[in-house]
Image (cartoon, helix red, strand yellow):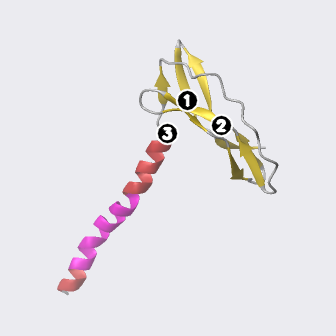
Amino acid sequence: MANRRQFLSAVPAFLVALAVPHAWAQRKERSEIVVNVAPPAPREERVPPPRRGYVWAPGYWRWEGRRHVWAAGHWVKARRGYHWTAPRWEERQGRHQFQQGRWERD
C-alpha cells in the first residue's frame, strides 16, 4: 500500500516534468527578435544542384545578441502540400523584426 501511495504521488510530478520542455519549446518558437540595426544586404549564394525530395532554404542574416551573422542556405526535406517561406527581416516603425522561415500550405 505504501508503494502504491508513493507511486501515485510521483505521477503528477512526472507529468509536469514531461510538459515543461514542450511548453518551453513552444514559447521559444514564438519569441520575437526586434532590433534597431538593419541587416546587411543578402549574400549571393551558389545554389547546389537540385536534390529530389528537398527544397532549398536560402541563407539569411540571423541576430546573435549584438550583431547580424550569416546563416548559410541549406536543403530541407520537402513536405507535400506545403511550400517553404524563407526567413526575412521586416522594417516596422524604424525597427527591424525577424520573421522565422516556415512551411505554408499551398
Kind of element beneath mark 3: helix
Q: In which quadrant is the N terminus drawn?
A: bottom left
Q: Earlier in the sequence, mark 1 or mark 3?
A: 3
Q: Give the range drawn in magenta.
A: 6-19
Q: Which of marks 2 and 1 is nearer the N terminus?
A: 2
Residue under circle 1? 98
Question: Which of pointers 2 and 3 indicates the residue nearer the eye?
Answer: 2
Residue under circle 3? 30
Amino acid bearing label 3: Arg
Amino acid bearing label 2: Gly
Check residue 59 in the rendering and tell me which mark sits there, or answer none. 2
Q: Is the magenta stretch mostly helix, strand or loop?
A: helix
Judge from the rendering whether residue 4 lies leftward or rightward of residue 59; answer left or right: left
Across and down, in percent, residue 60 comes to 62, 33
Q: Does the magenta stretch include residue 12?
A: yes
Kind of element beneath mark 2: loop
Residue 22's image quarter? bottom left
Alpha-carbon distance for marks 2 and 1?
A: 14 Å
Residue toward you, 65 or 23: 65
Question: Which of pointers 2 and 1 indicates the residue nearer the eye?
Answer: 2
Q: Is residue 98 magenta?
A: no
Judge from the rendering whether residue 102 lies leftward or rightward of residue 51; answer left or right: left
Judge from the rendering whether residue 83 lies leftward or rightward of residue 61; answer left or right: right
Q: Which residue is drawn at 34% across and 61% down?
A: 16
Across and down, in percent, residue 87 comes to 63, 35
Quick check: marks 1 and 3 in contact, CB under 8 Å?
no
Amino acid bearing label 1: Phe
Q: Count all numbered tags in the image, as a single digit.
A: 3
Q: Crowdedness of circle 1 by 10 Å Cα count: few (<14), some, many (20+)?
A: some
Q: Crowdedness of circle 3 by 10 Å Cα count: few (<14), some, many (20+)?
A: few
